[in-house]
Amino acid sequence: MLTTDCAFLENELMDVVRLFRQRPQSVLHSFRYENGVFYNDFTVDGESRSFLDQAEIQNELEYKRQERRFAKLALYELLSDKFKETMPWGALTGIRPTKLAYMELESGNDFRPLFEKMRVKKDNIELVARIVESQKGIYEKRDGNTDFFVSLPFCPTKCAYCSFITAPIDKTRAFLEPYLACLEKEIAAAKESVGNLRSVYIGGGTPFALDVPELERVLKATAFIRESCNPTCEYTVEAGRPDVFSEEKLRLLKDYGVTRICINPQTFSDATLATIGRKHTVADFYRAYEMTDKYDFSINIDLIAGLAGERVETFQKGVSLAAKLQADNVTVHCLCLKSGAKLKEETNYLEGEFISDMVGSSREILSSSGYVPYYMYRQKYQAGNNENVGWTKENKACVYNVDVMEETTDNVAVGANAVSKRVRNKTNLITRFASQKDLKTYIENVDTLIAKKRKFFL
């Protein structure tokens, strides 16, 4: 379907094609660069157009960066004209918008002209500006800064939209004891890789799917890192689904110094919860929230726009109910269906119009309720080509989320399916180290994994 004589652009151009609900039968692209001029020639379904752009080039990296922008923008404009459709983020694909904004700002430029050139809609340019402003005092590019992540890939049940490796804990319980033993070993070995510790995050899965003794093993092992490196750093547990909350688990978190907790209703509709396979009700969420609130944690609530069968009005009501609780953070995700998700098998394409309406209304509701956007990221195959945004009350932003989304900080990640990152800010180099995805393979290879990860962080 797409042919180009510029190999490093093939995937980038296909990402632009995938933005559109209608697809061209064929795209032919040829490229040349002469005397500071970029020439991009496209033939889309037999119709040809040529584009030329100029830019000052200092090195190979800058050459490729500019060509990506010019070629993607040219193809986007062609397809937008052909199919009479525009995208919320224009021709931007493959990079986090805030990261691109910071690149421009750190070069001494206002990011807005570039975003306008790439056809990003005005309200999204403003969203990026608000996020950059709200990250002041948290955003920091300094080599040696570290966040620590612990993976607990266990859930009560698997949700219909989920593409993670998690499986119902009743089906994986045979692996739980050896997994925890390996996790304890890996956490202990990871201390030497931790620099200036900014935050600790225990995520899932659903960490609260574990029973109290099992959860305490993880907290005790993780305490070794926090107490050794920075006892006062931010400490988050993504507790997860409200049907597995208990007073005993919450007291345990408090005893171990946890400062933030995530409760994830995803929707305030019992009908939607049943459709997506979550075995709890809205009433269960309220019980969990009330239970948690008295322990004085910072609380995050997650919601998803675009869940199966949910109307705009239902989603808007959910956002309003979340805002009424005045939790410190509310995160609004747009449904993203990847391979492995049950809904992916049942959905050919998610129409963008009503998703965009949901996103727009969430911005209005949360802004008027005293929240500001503080981090944002986008994914492939995201409903309506929209984005995920974290909203916060003043001075309540989650450091871990900012560091991870802006990729400014080393991330030492332990456990199955955990991805560690080594960030070298001075050279703008990011390298990744992925652990084995499935429990059995992780358990069998943990010693080799520890040795390799030690070398990775040297």
Image (cartoon, helix red, strand yellow):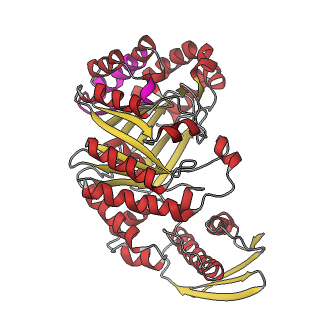
Can you tell which quarter of the image residue 1 is in?
bottom right
Residue at 33% x, 74% y: name it.
110
Instruction: State the image coordinates of residue 182 (x, y, percent, origin top left).
Output: 53, 18
Can you tell which quarter of the image residue 440 is in?
top right
From the viewer's perspective, tell me whether residue 98 is left or right of residue 443: left
**Does residue 237 belong to the magenta stretch?**
yes
Residue at 67% x, 45% y: name it.
339
Can you tell which quarter of the image residue 435 is in?
top right
In front: 431, or 215?
215
From the viewer's perspective, tell me whether residue 347 is left or right of residue 379: right
In front: 3, or 295?
295
Residue 271 visible in the snapshot: yes
- On screen, residue 272 above or below 371: above
- On screen, residue 206 above or below 116: above
- On screen, residue 201 above or below 442: below
**Does residue 348 belong to the magenta stretch?**
no
In front: 180, or 372?
372
Residue bounds of the magenta highlight: 217-243
Residue at 39% x, 15% y: name it.
216
Instruction: State the image coordinates of residue 143 (x, y, percent, origin top left).
Output: 35, 47
From the viewer's perspective, tell me whether residue 222 is left or right of residue 458: left
- On screen, residue 329 above or below 351: above
Figure label count: 0
In front: 365, or 402?
365
Residue at 63% x, 66% y: name it.
12
